[in-house]
Amino acid sequence: MATAQMTAGNFAPGVSYPRAAGGAAIARVSGVSKSYGSVQALREVNFTINAGEVVALLGPNGAGKSTLVRLLLGLASPTQGRVAVFGRDPKDPGSRVRVGAMLQVGGIPATMLVREHIDLFSSYYPCPLPMADVVAVAGLQGIEKRQYGDLSGGQKQRVLFALALCGDPDLLFLDEPTVGLDVEARRGFWEQIRKLVARGKTVLLTTHYLEEADALADRVVVINKGSIVAEGTPESIKANTAGKKIRCVTQLSLASIERMAGVVSARFDREAVEIQTSTAEATLRELLASDPGLFGLEVSNAGIEEAFLALTK
Amino acid sequence: MSSSVAVASAKWSRPLLKTVEIYWKESKYEFLKRWRMPVYSLSVILFPAMFYTLFGLVLNRDLSGGHREAATYLLATMGCYGVIGVALFGFGVGVATERGQGWLEVKRASPMPIPAYFTGRVMMCLVFSFLVFLTLFTLGTLFGGVRLAPLQLLGLMATLVLGSTPFCAFGLVIGYFTKPNSAPSVVNMLYLPLSFLSGLWMPIGVLPNFLQRLALALPPYHLGQLALHMVGMESRGDIHTHINVLIGFTLICLGVAVLGFRRDEGKLYG
């Protein structure tokens, strides 16, 4: 693609952006609180997005994810603190021309053609991608001349994705991009997001699908009740929070296993027992000593799902 | 993270030609979008045409046995009825729907200049208003013996086309203060009674006295009298008063709509 930028941080001619490990900070949220009337949606949040990374924002409903995205998009103002995107107020058109957003919408004008939607949105940006590129990247070949209202759910989602990327932005916000898609469509979508990242785009993604954060993100930020409760690579989040998962076939009762050192929980899974533990070594020593006939032993990192549940409990 | 935030350079601005392109495309696509919605494009043009044919060309006969006077009178007032519908359904229902669906928010998050969104919708209303005028004028000339001098024709056209703008502003208020599901019924509940009480369906003098006094407070009454004045029919009041009332009404509506626009920012989301 002719206008694609291949390196992170290389955003505009004549302006230099400092680069650090993982790229320069291109968006920063400092000491931000946001309340709606008596409801406090965010408390003292500090958060940075670096050039070239994929950040996943995870949290249950009402945790403040969407509020954070709305502040970063300049759709709302913080009650306290400061939000900067590309060093500017996110409401400033100078930062908006470098940002693309895919938000959750109930519907978009149904009687406009796919091509017309892209043409209109492209006109808002100074250096939009050529129409053919947008159509190719978003996978809209063959449906450009159809009315939006006649498309399937997955196709509609891809049109919204096309509108987020048509301006060739450096930073993309994807708010629950694969909600309502089937497994195959979701995996196809992940491929499209990976292609964007390969071209040096920075992505902030909010999602309910923990698997999605695990598959796409360099960094996961877990948010709950308006505060950031954990931050790190998907691996470090899993390692630091929920410990290990032990799986084995044993004659011991669940009650006796639950009394062992480090055990958080134990349950039957078909013929085997699945044990969550904070200190795998201590639990294993006790397990092997109590049941010499134990077999089928497996020890693994807990899934991000368990990590997430432990963090937001 | 120890990296620093990139420092912004000077204030960003868009070249004039790009801005013009955005306004043009917003208007063009808004029109196409509406044109392809038969529920809108057919009803805002065909309903006034149907009522005009019925009351102006078929039922009301002049003393001479012709239709000319009634056809001219109702060309002016039914024209007002038509363009008010264009604005209330286009703006009121349109904005309420796009706000409710979150589409307006996607637009607000984009680098689109906000005025372009509203300008596009006003332009769409102006074009549809012109189509309403053209349809009624053609019917009246062909079948009602309506004969207008060139200045009268221009005056009526300008009144009807520009006369839709105060109701665009009113529609904006409806769009910002109703839910998408209730917007069409709110518009319907206001549209017909307002038109009737403002003397757009039958001459205002036919209504009881207290309703005639009430009409002075209704903006469509002033638009109707202005249109009647333009075609040389007997009209009430002073045209400057009518114009001032319509301008004042527009400004008040815009002020209220701005409150709604600001309120959207504080809306609660998970």
Image: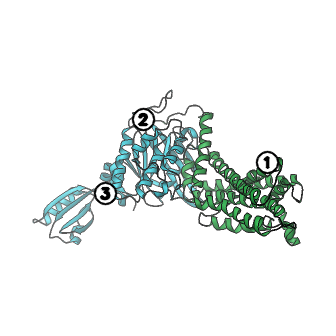
Considering every residue shown, the one lying at the far front of the view is: B65
Label 1 is placed on what type of residue?
A: Leu
Vertical comparison of A98 with B132: above or below: above
Considering every residue shown, the one lying at the far left of the view is: A293
For label 1, the crowd category at 10 Å Cα-Cα, with few meaning under 14, some 14 to 19 and many 20 or more, is some
Q: Percent from the top left, x then y, of residue B168?
A: 70, 55
Which residue bears the numbered disc 3?
A: A242
Left or right position of B162 against B238: left
Label 3 is placed on what type of residue?
A: Ala
Q: Percent from the top left, x then y, of residue A130?
A: 46, 38
Q: Nearer the viewer, residue A296 or A145?
A: A145
Q: Mark 3 belongs to which subunit?
A: A
Q: Mark 2 belongs to which subunit?
A: A
Label 1: state its secondary structure: helix
Q: Which chain is cyan?
A: A
Which residue bears the numbered disc 2?
A: A4
| Whether marks 3 and 1 lie on the same chain | no
Label 2 is placed on what type of residue?
A: Ala
Left or right position of B269 against A278: right
Disc 1/disc 2 C-alpha distance (Å): 52 Å
Identify the mark nearer the N-term, 3 or 2: 2
For label 3, the crowd category at 10 Å Cα-Cα, with few meaning under 14, some 14 to 19 and many 20 or more, is many
Residue B164 visible at all: yes
Which quadrant holds the N terminus of chain A?
A: top left
